[in-house]
Amino acid sequence: MGSLDFYIDFNIEIENLNDNFKQEADRRLFKLAEGKNDIVGASVSAETIVKVESPYLYQVRIVVYKRPKDIAATEKDEDPMAALKNALSAIERKVQESRKKRSEASMRSSDDIDMVVYEMSPEELYSAYVDESQEPADVISLELTEFTTKLIVEEGLSQEAAYFAAERIIQLADRYVNDPKVEPPPEITN
């Protein structure tokens, strides 16, 4: 991620706040976004919410602009830096939980696709994963590992499911070419 891809807006309403406040927010938020493309920016606001002689009470609110849904955390403390650190910790935890949930959902959908592959007939696999302009003889000429890799990269199948599908597709193409009793469906013949 380039530095122009991520931005932080600050809205600081606390007087005499030192530079360490912004530096800490910058450092931790940039680290949270580093190497990821789900976070595009953040907003940090800090304000005094109780203005009596002692103790002052400060509130820090951080919003991370994250796909698919923004995440926010608000913390209060007598020390603005402590409120910031607590809010940053809360944001980091929420972002990690969100990423974990999305990863698990992605794994589940990938597993669902794999399960469908195992339930498909060789004919269904052939029509689903072979381009209709491709002749059965062309499919036979493919190396099993080459075809498996294509299914992994282009179709998002797991290695095991891709191998399963590729093997059955190549076997069926071989039958179409070499067994005169087996007629390929009309959409396969040109």
Image (tube, rainbow, N blue to C red):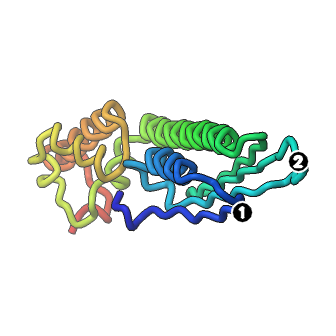
Identify which residue is drawn at 31% across, 34% down. 159
Q: Residue furthest left?
A: 141
Confirm whether residue 70 shows in the render: no
> Taking 98 as reference, is 122 left or right?
left
| Corner quadrant of residue 2 | bottom left
User: Label 2: which residue?
Assistant: 53
Q: Quadrant of residue 145?
A: top left
Q: For this rendering, which residue is in front, 185 or 10? A: 10
Q: Position of residue 123 (x, y in %)?
A: 36, 47
Q: Nearer the viewer, residue 145 or 28?
A: 28
Identify the residue under disc 1. Answer: 13
- Is 115 placed left or right of 95 in the picture? left
Residue at image location 88% in from the left, 51% down from the top: 50
Q: Is residue 187 left or right of residue 28?
A: left
Please tell me which residue is depicted at 26% across the width and 53% down the height of the picture: 183
Q: Residue furthest right?
A: 52
Q: Position of residue 124 (x, y in %)?
A: 40, 48
Among the two numbered marks 2 and 1 on one chain, the one whose residue lies closer to the N terminus: 1
